[in-house]
């Protein structure tokens, strides 16, 4: 599946159906009078967040969405049928922006969240509604209110608890594969990761979502490399893991480059808590790892976690630190296991007929 996190689409709600001009004509009825019914309501444009979607690729091939018009009114005071609403499914984490790409109209953050973005037009009045004591045979009617229309931008920001950042070749893909079920591509060249990857991490009975984004280089805020367009996918994260390659010539400099790019991007990323991890420690001796760790702390890191995505060294300690930033959740029982003894089981009640 191709990944697309931005799309521009055209929306138009349905117009209201026109009212009818009709007069009652039945045998043996001398004075029929007007009986034109009202028109039906046009369809609304409704956006709803659904699970199972993590890309906006469908909107690349279908960019125009128009709801149907309401049916026209008919004689015998029959109101036209209202048109069905047009429901558009979007991934959770999608933002709907005005055409200026700055004003956020809707932010979908929960499953099942729905918003009526454009309302359908009301149906027009038939001539029966104009009947009065002084206007016994009205012939006027309304054509129905036209539907609303607008262009909007859809921008997807993946929902993840933890974000993974670092320079290219810092070992982020190997790391996310080691701690989750992501299955990211691994290669010995820069920018192996071209699109964000999500993985579910299970640690000590807890689950959280880890997001890996393409590597940042100096000048990413100005468009260097892949740029900073994917940083929006970690704006909602509670904590960031900053992965630094121990084989880098100057790890403190590598840390500062990423920190500067996060600050240049803004959106609160510079204020998010970060866990600095010195990766690929299996390729160096303990003395070198300790020295680099001290240099990173001197450069501003509160603590440095020596880890190895290839061997799994130090990962448990890093994951323990991650859990401290996440909200408490009930530990999930593994399939096939019995409840622990310290959990009170519900009392068994004798069977009684209902």
Image (spheres, rainbow, N blue to C red):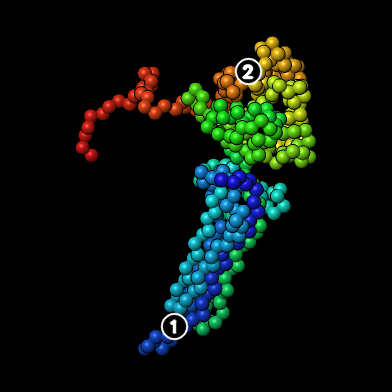
Image disc number at residue 135: none
Position of residue 32 relative to residue 285, above or below, is below
| Residue shown at 60% from the left, 53% from the top | 59
| Residue shown at 48% from the left, 71% from the top | 80
Position of residue 16 relative to residue 331, above or below, is below
- Which of 16/6 is in front? 6
- Which of 216/112 is in front? 216
Q: Mark 2 falls on what kind of element?
A: helix
- Which of 93/230 is in front? 230
Residue 26 picture location, percent across and down: 39, 85
Image disc number at residue 282: 2
Residue 127 picture location, percent across and down: 52, 78
- Chain-order first, disc 2 or disc 1: 1
Quadrant for the C terminus, please. Answer: top left
Q: Mark 1 falls on what kind of element?
A: loop
* Residue 162 visible from this viewpoint: no
């Amino acid at each position: 599946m191709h990944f697309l996190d931005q799309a521009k689409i055209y929306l138009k709600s349905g117009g209201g159906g026109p009212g009818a001009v009709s007069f009652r004509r039945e045998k043996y009825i001398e004075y029929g009078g007007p009986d034109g019914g009202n028109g039906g309501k046009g369809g609304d444009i409704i956006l709803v967040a659904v699970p199972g979607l993590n890309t906006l690729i469908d909107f690349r091939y279908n960019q125009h969405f128009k709801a149907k018009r309401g049916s026209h009114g008919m004689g015998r005071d029959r109101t036209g049928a209202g048109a069905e609403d047009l429901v558009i499914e979007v991934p959770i984490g999608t933002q709907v922006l005005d055409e200026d790409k700055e004003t956020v109209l809707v932010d979908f953050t929960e499953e099942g969240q729905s918003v009526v973005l454009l309302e359908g037009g009301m149906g027009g009045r038939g001539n029966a509604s104009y009947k009065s004591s002084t206007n016994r045979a009205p012939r006027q009617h309304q054509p129905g209110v036209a539907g609303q229309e607008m262009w909007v931008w859809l921008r997807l920001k993946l929902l993840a608890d933890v974000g993974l950042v670092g320079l290219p070749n810092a070992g982020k893909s190997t790391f996310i594969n080691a701690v989750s079920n992501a299955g990211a591509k691994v290669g010995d060249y820069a920018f192996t990761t071209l699109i964000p990857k999500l993985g579910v991490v299970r640690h000590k009975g807890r689950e959280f979502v880890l997001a890996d984004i393409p590597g940042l280089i100096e000048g990413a805020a100005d468009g260097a490399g892949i740029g900073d367009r994917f940083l929006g996918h970690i704006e909602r994260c509670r904590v960031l893991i900053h992965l630094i390659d121990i084989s880098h010539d100057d790890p403190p400099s590598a840390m500062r480059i990423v920190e500067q790019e996060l600050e240049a991007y803004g959106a609160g990323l510079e204020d998010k808590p970060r866990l600095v991890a010195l990766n690929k420690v299996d390729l160096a001796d303990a003395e070198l790892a300790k020295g680099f760790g001290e240099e990173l702390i001197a450069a501003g890191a509160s603590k440095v976690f020596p880890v190895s995505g290839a061997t799994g060294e130090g990962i448990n300690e890093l994951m323990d630190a991650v859990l401290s930033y996440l909200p408490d959740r009930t530990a999930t029982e593994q399939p096939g296991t019995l409840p622990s003894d310290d959990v009170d089981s519900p009392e068994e009640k004798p069977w009684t007929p209902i």
